[in-house]
Amino acid sequence: MTDPHHGAAAPADPAEGGSAASGVSRRSLLGFGGAGLAALAAGFAGGLGTGRATAAPAAPAPASDVVPFHGTHQAGIATRAQDRLHFATFDLTTTSRDDLVDLLQRWTVAAERMTRGLPAGELGPVSGPYEAPPDDTGEAQELSAANLTITFGFGPSLFDDRFGLADRRPALLEDLPHFPGDMLEDARTGGDLAVQACADDPQVAVHAIRNLARIAFGTAQVRWSQLGYGRTSRTSQAQATPRNLFGFKDGTANILAEDAAALDEHVWVAGADDPDAAWLAGGSYLVARRIRMNIETWDRGSLHEQETIIGRTKGSGAPLSGGKEGTEPDFARQGNGGQPLIDPASHVAMAHPDANGGVRMLRRGYNYTDGSDGLGRLDAGLFFLAFVRNPATHYVPMQNALAKNDLLSEYLRHTGSGLWAVPPGTRDGGWVGQALFDS
């Protein structure tokens, strides 16, 4: 589908000193004093732990394999889309604002480390106290950073009366409306917090979410999660256009990282957008939709029917009005009988900016396959992820129109959904969402 569906451990670790890390060391999580833990760790390193301490160095992470965690915007939005995804949302199990802040600080430290190819904790999976849980689960040992990015978002429910944040809730951060044809499952919808982990190695992405869930124990718990593979859009000129599970190229017209003007206009929230939520300036809104494809029904359709529904050729991805993949569709061009070559109800026509007030979005969706259902049908489809500056103008009207009139809708079933405010990036020593909590 096009358009909306469209290390070896570093020798020195800046996160270990002076930053948010300093106040949220995993030592406190384990209930040990810093000196006591150091002595205990040293004891194991000198005796029983000697072999363990030297047997599991983190794999070297080539410079080209690391996406910087810190920056003006969070990584994982306009940065190059990786091949694999582990997405999870969390419900907070605490009502303490201090606990929430502590969690975000500890998540920031762990996320920054893992994106560099380091273990989530400073002791790693095998070098800590023998009688205490390791501060990294270990399945990413010897693996590189794999271009891991970890992106955090805040759901509408975070701004209820639990944490004193109600007056800082962005005006646009509302639960998405019910769209025609929605068959949403509660177990795949919403969440106080959302975390998107993308990497070029699935084990690295899974490792990231697993360790963040481990760190959150006692403060937050996973509400739902989704694995994805085969990115369904490109976010850089250097990337080829991928294909979705219907076999069509997807993301031909996506906003690319090289188009700064389009990112400013359609993706990044500006300070003047919502003065009461100035903390979100430089951030974005994340829309997630789990879209199951009726694969078996689609596979029985003729090539002619499939291309008519999409509005592009299945081979090259060119619009049916002619040209190459990157050719702008000509919706007025007519064929035999005076009929438009591109059906006005095709997916490409319905999703084109010309049909939606000129708005665009940055998509980072992934294919998913969760086995088969009880009738032997593939439970597979698209995990749609998109970042927009304004969900009320850049997503809701388009999805309403698609759900009502898009020829493709007959083959889709939306089963999961959510909207989150994605705070801006962090600087070294800061933590995710810090401006939200600053007075």
Image (tube, rainbow, N blue to C red):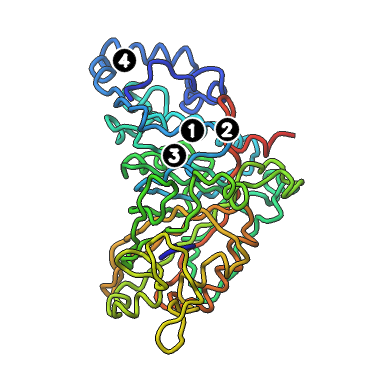
Q: Residue at x 42, y 73 (%)?
A: 321
Quadrant (top left, top right, bottom left, bottom right) of the N terminus: bottom left
Q: CA distance from mark 3 to mark 2?
A: 13 Å
Evaluate if marks 1 and 2 touch, with contact meaning CB atoms under 8 Å apart.
yes
Circle 2 — which element?
loop
Q: In the image, residue 305 lies at what x, y percent?
A: 34, 80
Mark drawn on residue 321: none
Q: CA distance from mark 4 to mark 1?
A: 32 Å
Circle 1 — which element?
loop
Evaluate if marks 3 and 2 touch, with contact meaning CB atoms under 8 Å apart.
no
Question: Would residue 394 be found to the left or right of residue 296 on screen?
Answer: right
Give the number of marks.
4
Q: Amino acid at mark 3?
A: Thr
Quadrant (top left, top right, bottom left, bottom right) of the C terminus: top right
User: Earlier along the polypeptide chain: callout 3 or callout 1?
Assistant: 1
Q: Is residue 432 above or below residue 383?
A: above
Evaluate if marks 3 and 1 touch, with contact meaning CB atoms under 8 Å apart.
yes
Q: Is residue 154 visible?
A: no
User: Earlier along the polypeptide chain: callout 3 or callout 4?
Assistant: 4
Circle 4 — which element?
helix
Q: Is residue 193 visible?
A: yes
Mark drawn on residue 69: 1
Evaluate if marks 2 and 4 touch, with contact meaning CB atoms under 8 Å apart.
no
Q: CA distance from mark 3 to mark 4?
A: 33 Å
Question: Would residue 92 be found to the left or right of residue 135 on screen?
Answer: right
Q: In the image, residue 170 lies at what x, y percent?
A: 69, 51
For label 2, the residue is 426
Q: Is residue 47 above or below residue 268?
A: above
